[in-house]
């Protein structure tokens, strides 16, 4: 990292969100503050809003507390831990231990509007007692003891069964975190949340409230394997809710999310085999190609390309319609003696002439009445990410167990699935944030995708220092292996993943910070400016502190 310009002194606490909002409202609508205080009825009148009893609202017990949690400032700090870090000097990535709501609020000072992608895999609220510490006046250990999650010795005790109202605490926990996460995103940023069917309907309503229903993009279905003990339907699917920070911005920029099609290598291998075997007898090669596609089992990625069922010296190809999908006057013209289709040709005359010179136009023979266009598979390798896909979850668990030497974490996300999404939604230099880091799958996925395409995306991961659950087999194994917290598993997984990818690449490292209580006696604290460029902001986060400065404020 190079030298940095002087940066501003940090306040002892983050700005109260309500105070900032009121200041903005007072500036925009001074008439709503007749006595210096906000009059909600006057504000609605100024906006021309009429309240009705028929309007749809989403609410739950604890919603007002969730809003207060979202507005509340934090006086916590981030303490750097070089000893736990990997390649501190060269590392571009950040791993933070602490409650994610505290950390998200701390990151607002410098990372607001900087993340291209936020991905989370939050607790699924499957029926066990749900507790989450949003009262920061006590330590994490004190809270765990007070709520009965650990005994006086710090050991995890059995969880109680839920007796009604299990959704409200989960929603109350999620709301302020989603509010904070949204503000980290760039205008063209994207938010992804993995969730199962216990809370997917509630989470979508919650995200509609936070992001706006107009910014909903899709609900992907991840089929991860059938449940063998299912009594009615096989189930086995999770969902990924996709929201844009500002979908209008994506339309304005004509954004197209694309990923490379799967199964291509198998098709190309068969293509080479058939051309080697049949030479220029393309009819024989075509017959063999179609027989091969027919024999492929359902679910094989290569089978989705079975409509590319012709072959010649240029490779496997399919024929496509030459008609424009929409009427355009400039596409209405005669071509080589053929009248135009009703909507006109797909391309303008110059493009059609170029396709003809390259031998990519198929002229009518027999019953055919229209010119068709030859499209080779190798020229059509990218497409929009699939809304429904299959990936067996057991593979991710096995891979993590092999990496860690023991099964110390339940249900990690598959890094190849995350890497595909990262590739489709992000570009070189983009920031990816995951504030429910778990075993660290997102960090490893970013590294793996960078290795594939040569880009330099970077990440910030946040994980609470929760104790492995002694009531699960993986929790027992984790404790037996010496991991006293999930955060330690996260960090060790990333250390091992870095060595596995390239033991000599020092950019495959991360800087560890730990969220701690306020540290007001330090006068030389620093904060990164919100208007700095992303690279400068990243550098400022990693600025070398003087020996006496033990806490870094961000």
Image: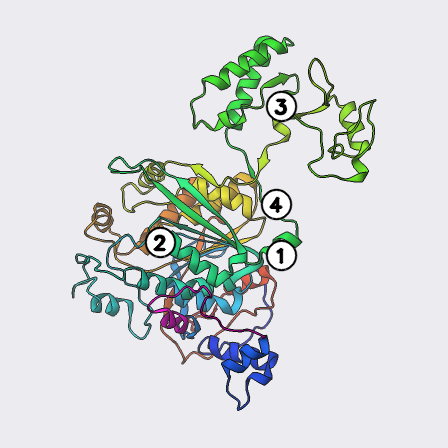
Mark 1 element type: helix
Q: Position of residue 233 (x, y in %)?
A: 31, 38
248 relative to 88 in the view: left or right:
right
Q: CA distance from mark 1 to mark 2?
A: 29 Å
Tag 3 residue: 318
Q: Return the mark for residue 199.
A: 2
Mark 3 element type: strand
Residue at screen point 42% across, 22% down: 297
- First reached walking from the N terminus: tag 1 or tag 3: 1
Q: Return the mark for residue 249.
A: 1
Q: Return the mark for residue 423.
A: none
Front position in the image: 214 or 248? 214
Q: What stretch of residues is rendered in magenta?
A: 48-69
- First reached walking from the N terminus: tag 3 or tag 2: 2
Callout in the foreground (1, 2): 2
Q: CA distance from mark 4 to mark 3?
A: 23 Å
- Quarter of the image that includes the N terminus: bottom right
Q: CA distance from mark 1 to mark 4?
A: 12 Å
Callout in the foreground (4, 2): 2
Residue at screen point 47% across, 63% down: 210
- First reached walking from the N terminus: tag 1 or tag 4: 1
- First reached walking from the N terminus: tag 1 or tag 2: 2
Tag 4 residue: 256
Residue at screen point 75% across, 23% down: 358
């Amino acid at each position: 990292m190079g030298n940095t310009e002087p940066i501003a002194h940090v306040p002892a606490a983050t700005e109260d969100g309500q105070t900032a909002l009121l200041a903005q409202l007072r500036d925009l609508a001074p008439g709503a503050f007749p006595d210096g205080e906000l009059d909600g009825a006057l504000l609605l009148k100024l906006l021309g809003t009429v309240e009705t009893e028929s309007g749809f609202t989403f609410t739950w017990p604890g919603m007002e507390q969730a809003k207060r949690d979202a507005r509340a400032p934090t006086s916590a700090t981030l303490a750097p831990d070089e000893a736990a870090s990997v390649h501190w000097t060269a590392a571009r990535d950040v791993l933070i231990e602490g409650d994610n709501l505290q950390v998200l609020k701390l990151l607002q000072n410098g990372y607001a509007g900087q993340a291209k992608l936020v991905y989370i895999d939050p607790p699924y609220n499957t029926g066990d007692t749900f507790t989450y510490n949003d009262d920061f006046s006590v330590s994490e250990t004190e809270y765990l003891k007070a709520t009965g999650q650990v005994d006086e010795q710090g050991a995890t005790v059995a969880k109680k069964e839920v007796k009604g109202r299990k959704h409200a605490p989960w929603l109350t926990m999620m709301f302020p975190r989603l509010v904070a996460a949204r503000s980290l995103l760039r205008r063209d940023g994207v938010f992804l949340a993995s969730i199962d069917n216990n809370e997917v309907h509630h989470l979508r309503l919650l995200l509609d409230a936070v992001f706006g229903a107009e910014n909903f993009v899709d609900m992907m279905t991840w089929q991860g394997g059938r449940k063998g003990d299912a009594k009615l339907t096989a189930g086995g699917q999770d969902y990924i809710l996709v929201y844009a920070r500002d979908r209008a911005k994506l339309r304005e920029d004509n954004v197209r999310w694309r990923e490379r099609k799967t199964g291509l290598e198998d098709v190309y291998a068969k293509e080479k085999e058939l051309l080697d075997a049949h030479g220029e007898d393309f009819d024989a090669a075509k017959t063999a190609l179609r027989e091969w596609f027919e024999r492929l089992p359902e679910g094989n990625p290569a089978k989705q390309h079975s409509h590319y069922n012709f072959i010649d010296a240029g490779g496997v190809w399919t024929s496509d319609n030459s008609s424009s999908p929409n009427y355009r006057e400039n596409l209405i013209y005669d071509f080589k003696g053929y009248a135009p289709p009703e909507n006109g040709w797909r391309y303008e005359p110059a493009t059609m002439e170029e396709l003809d010179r390259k031998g990519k136009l198929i002229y009518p023979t027999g019953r055919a009445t229209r010119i068709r266009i030859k499209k080779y598979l190798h020229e059509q390798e990218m497409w929009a990410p699939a809304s429904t896909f299959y990936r067996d979850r057991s593979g991710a668990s096995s891979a993590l167990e092999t990496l860690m030497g023991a099964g110390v974490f339940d249900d990690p996300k598959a890094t190849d699935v995350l890497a595909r999404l990262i590739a489709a939604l992000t570009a070189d230099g983009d920031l990816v944030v995951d504030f429910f880091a778990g075993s660290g799958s997102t960090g490893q996925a970013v590294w793996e995708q960078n290795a594939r395409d040569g880009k330099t995306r970077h990440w910030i991961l946040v994980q609470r220092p929760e104790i492995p659950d002694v009531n699960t087999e993986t929790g027992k194994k984790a404790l037996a292996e010496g991991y006293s917290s999930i955060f330690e598993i996260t960090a060790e997984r990333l250390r091992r993943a870095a060595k596995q990818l390239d033991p000599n690449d020092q950019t495959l490292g991360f800087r560890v910070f730990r969220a701690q209580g306020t540290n007001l006696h330090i006068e030389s604290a620093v904060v990164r400016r919100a208007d700095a460029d992303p690279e400068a902001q990243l550098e400022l986060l990693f600025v070398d502190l003087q020996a006496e400065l033990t806490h870094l404020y961000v």
